[in-house]
């Protein structure tokens, strides 16, 4: 059996610094040779099987270097799919990995359907069905649970958007049908054209917007933006360090000096956080320090989660109260730190101020309370209370490809209307757009049982 050449990102999104793009099929080596420049000018087609080569991915169209990579060359049938397989290891970064994948597609590969690599292994007699299912379980178990939740949230939002767009198209098509049924009205033709033009332009704009989100290339791998705020000396940096559990990140406040926001990436029970320790939100006369404060405010406004640190052995101050006001309406956790020292703070007052938000007490000095804090963070996330605000709707290459096709057919519908093409031709383009959008959410794919089974695999497996 001979298939075409498929390609996909085969590392889970949001994991690790290295991403692998995999390609399988008769043209794998040919396509690799088009985009890969090895250091010694070796041709992939000529190198020994099961060898690894270092070099650059270069866009043959623009000569632009896209990535520095290691390429594994594996000749069939001694491969997972029994076909010629290329694995490209790159540094990751969703944007550049997606670009690499697109480059393979423009040079002759096809985007793999979910589970298609495993499906080929099955169809080529490499594995049987139960083995295929075992692989599937393994992939499921390995998938980061936070990533699943995040993808769920994103997909929920994407599906909703796509559904309403499809509805819009459907209603337009229905209206056009009605108009066609009543040709006795004089202006019906012009009305129909105008309706199609308006609706198509609306759909075009919405698809464009969605495609724009994909270009940001940003997904949860960047983490929930989490800001630590509090008066000086309450223990913000200590908290950052506790969460990072890495002394290299230690930052002590040097009074009177400005510092930028400190950033650290941590994984709290499967929840990726991008932690930011601010220079303090307090008002200050010092113009130099103000730069830090202004930045802090901006960061605060854009945060997905706030960690507000208070001092257990100090009275609540005006500044504390102002901080509560500044973060009103946002998702935050109150951390009352320094419980190893005598209590001075009014806990009832904190409960009043923080309304229904979570609160934990800690002694960062004695390493106490961090567990409870981590628990609070992860439960907020997994209960869906906090969501990454800058999460891209569209990050999946299959979705991007479908959206591009949908954009193309809606463009054709628009130019059709503008050139006075007969309505029934334009209807075909609109219907096609509707179908392509449906494929994104799986509404217009009618698959066989085998297809359904394999579609449960992650893309690239
Ligand atoms: P920041 O200014 O809010 O970043 O506070 P730091 O993290 O730099 O901590 C200020 C001081 O408080 C440091 O001397 C810390 O060692 C101390 N500190 C932090 N957490 C605790 C705690 O739980 N108990 C006590 N006793 N001291 C703490
Ligand atoms: Zn600090």
Image: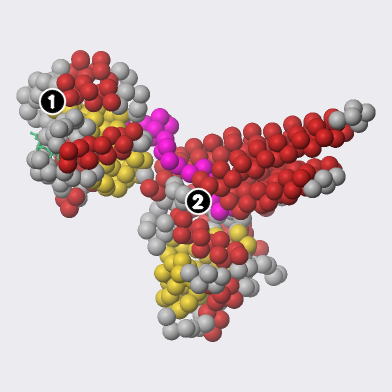
Is residue 392 a member of the stretch shown in magenta? Answer: yes
Picture layout, residue 247 above or below residue 378 = below
How has the structure been colored for display? secondary structure
Q: How many marks?
A: 2
Q: Residue at x 29, y 46 (%)?
A: 266
**Mark 2 and mark 1: Cα distance apart in space:** 45 Å
- State left or right for residue 328 relative to residue 23: left
Query: Which percent across, then down, holds residue 356?
Result: 32, 19
Mark 1 Cα-neighbour bin, 10 Å: few <14, some 14–19, many ≥20? many
Q: Quadrant of the N terminus?
A: bottom right
Residue 143 appears in the rendering? no
Does the Cβ of the disc 1 residue fall within 8 Å of ligand 1? Answer: yes
Residue pointed to by mark 2: 215
Q: Which mark is residue 198?
A: none
- Residue under numbered circle 1: 312
Pointers 2 and 1 in contact (C-beta within 8 Å): no
Mark 2 is surrounded, within 10 Å at the Cα level, by few (under 14), some (14 to 19) or many (20 or more) other residues, namely some
Point out the frontmost of discs 2 and 1. 2
Q: Which residues are magenta?
A: 376-398
């Amino acid at each position: 059996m001979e298939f075409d050449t498929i390609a996909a990102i085969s590392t889970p999104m949001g994991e690790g610094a290295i991403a692998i793009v995999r390609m399988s099929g008769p043209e794998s080596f040919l396509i690799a040779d088009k985009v890969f420049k090895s250091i010694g000018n070796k041709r992939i087609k000529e190198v020994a099987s099961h060898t690894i080569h270092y070099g650059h991915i270069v866009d043959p169209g623009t000569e632009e270097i896209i990535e520095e990579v290691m390429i594994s060359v594996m000749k069939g049938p001694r491969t997972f799919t029994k076909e010629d397989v290329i694995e490209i290891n790159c540094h990751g970064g969703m944007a550049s990995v997606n670009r690499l994948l697109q480059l393979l597609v423009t040079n002759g590969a096809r985007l793999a359907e979910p589970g298609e690599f495993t499906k080929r292994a099955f169809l080529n007699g490499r594995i049987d069905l139960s083995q295929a299912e075992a692989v599937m379980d393994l992939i499921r178990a390995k998938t980061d649970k936070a990533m699943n939740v995040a993808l769920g949230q994103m997909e929920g939002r994407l599906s909703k958007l796509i559904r309403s767009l499809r509805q819009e198209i459907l209603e337009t098509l229905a209206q056009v049908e009605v108009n066609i049924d009543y040709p006795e009205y004089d202006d019906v033709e012009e009305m129909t054209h105008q309706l199609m033009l308006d609706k198509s332009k609306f759909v075009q704009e919405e698809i464009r917007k969605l495609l724009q989100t994909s270009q940001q290339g940003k997904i949860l791998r960047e983490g929930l933006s989490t800001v630590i705020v509090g008066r000086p000396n309450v223990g913000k940096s200590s908290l950052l360090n506790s969460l990072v559990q890495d002394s290299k990140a230690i930052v002590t406040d040097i009074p009177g000096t400005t510092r930028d926001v400190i950033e650290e990436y941590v994984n709290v029970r499967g929840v990726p956080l991008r932690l930011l320790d601010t220079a303090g939100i307090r008002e200050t006369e010092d113009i130099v320090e103000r730069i830090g404060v202004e930045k802090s405010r901006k960061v605060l406004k854009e945060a997905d989660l706030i960690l507000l640190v208070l001092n257990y052995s100090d009275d609540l101050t005006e500044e504390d109260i102002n901080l509560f006001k500044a973060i009103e309406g946002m998702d935050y956790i109150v951390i009352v730190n320094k419980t190893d020292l005598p209590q001075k703070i009014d806990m009832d007052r904190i409960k009043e101020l923080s309304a229904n938000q979570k609160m934990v007490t800690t002694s960062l000095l004695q390493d106490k309370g961090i567990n409870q804090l981590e628990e609070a963070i992860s439960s907020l996330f997994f209960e869906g209370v906090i969501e990454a605000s800058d999460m891209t709707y569209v990050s999946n290459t299959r979705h991007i490809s479908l959206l591009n096709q949908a954009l193309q057919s809606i463009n054709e519908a628009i130019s059709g209307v503008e050139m006075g093409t007969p309505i029934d031709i334009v209807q075909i383009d609109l219907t096609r757009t509707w179908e392509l959008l449906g494929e994104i959410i799986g509404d217009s794919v009618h698959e066989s049982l085998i297809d359904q089974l394999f579609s449960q695999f992650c893309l690239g497996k």
